[in-house]
Image (cartoon, rainbow, N blue to C red):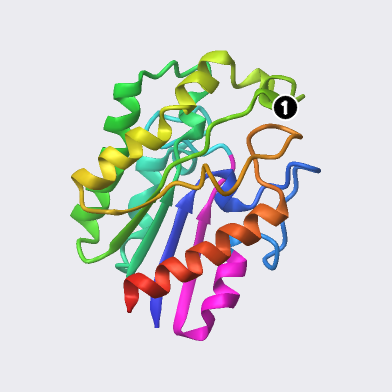
Amino acid sequence: MKKILCFGDSNTFGYNPENGLRFPSNERWSGILQSLLGNKYQIIEAGCNNRTCFRDNFNGENLTGYKALPKYLSNNPDIIILWIGSNDLQRFYNVSLEEIQYGIENLIEIIKNNSPNSKIILISPLEMKQEVLSSKIFSFLFDENSIEKSKHFSEIYKIVAQKYNCSFIDFSQTITPSKIDGLHFENIEHEKIANYLYNFIKNING
């Protein structure tokens, strides 16, 4: 049985923008992907609300990506889907574009040092939408600078993927964040993500 680690933040966890709860397994992309792939694969769900990629999260180690990731690598997953970075753009962290690139590179180096045989699928976070500024919850965390920096995710992550010979996916042309908060995906987008990843994984595994 092949093991697939899905490591990320709230959009990997399955945060529902309508009510703040978690989508059930049959509506979040990682759960749908498990159903599509069947019993020859084991999906390891490792999404977490508010998890950063490289900034030390105020809420602890499990919410700090580079500190939380190593514990998931001990079983040497066959494939690692890495989709994280949006929370580092919170206004409190004030990161530069260079720091974003260094941060995701550090996460990949952690994988290569701890699970060198794992195939890595790097997914760039989506550009945040203006609705995040009017969200009751997320307007406190993100600002115009966050939105502007998020526009560079795709180019930065593509550079990193090429540098480290990772598979790369950019969903910016196929899915969009909810108009509710400009940040999270509604269930129809989770279904699109799962179907795309199903075909992508089948192709890279032959």
- Tell me the quarter of the image containing the C terminus: bottom left
Confirm whether the magenta stretch covers residue 38.
Answer: yes
The crowding category of the residue bearing disc 1, from other C-alpha atoms within 10 Å (few below 14, some 14 to 19, many at least 20), is few
* Residue furthest right in the image: 19
Residue 163 position by quadrant:
top left
The magenta segment: 31-49
Name the element at disc 1. Answer: loop
In the rendered view, does 185 fall on the left or right side of 96? Answer: right
How many numbered discs, if any?
1
Q: Which residue is depicted at the point 43% across and 38% down?
A: 64
Which is more toward the observer, 63 or 3?
A: 3
Image height check: is 62 above or below 120? Answer: above
List x then y, in percent, for residue 41: 45, 78
Q: Which residue is depicted at the point 72% across and 62% down?
A: 24
* Residue furthest front in the image: 173
List x then y, in percent, for residue 7: 45, 53
Q: Which residue is depicted at the point 71% across and 49% down?
A: 186
Residue 26 position by quadrant:
bottom right
List x then y, in percent, for residue 46: 50, 56
Image height check: is 142 above or below 153? Answer: above
Residue 99 position by quadrant:
top left
Q: Which residue is depicted at the point 29% across and 23% down?
A: 98
Image height check: is 121 above or below 89? Answer: below
- Tell me the quarter of the image containing the N terminus: bottom left
Which is more toward the observer, 120 or 87?
A: 120
Q: Amino acid at mark 1?
A: Ile
List x then y, in percent, for residue 108: 27, 47
In the rendered view, does 13 fall on the left or right side of 205? Answer: right
Confirm whether the magenta stretch covers residue 119.
Answer: no
The residue pinned by badge 1 equals 137
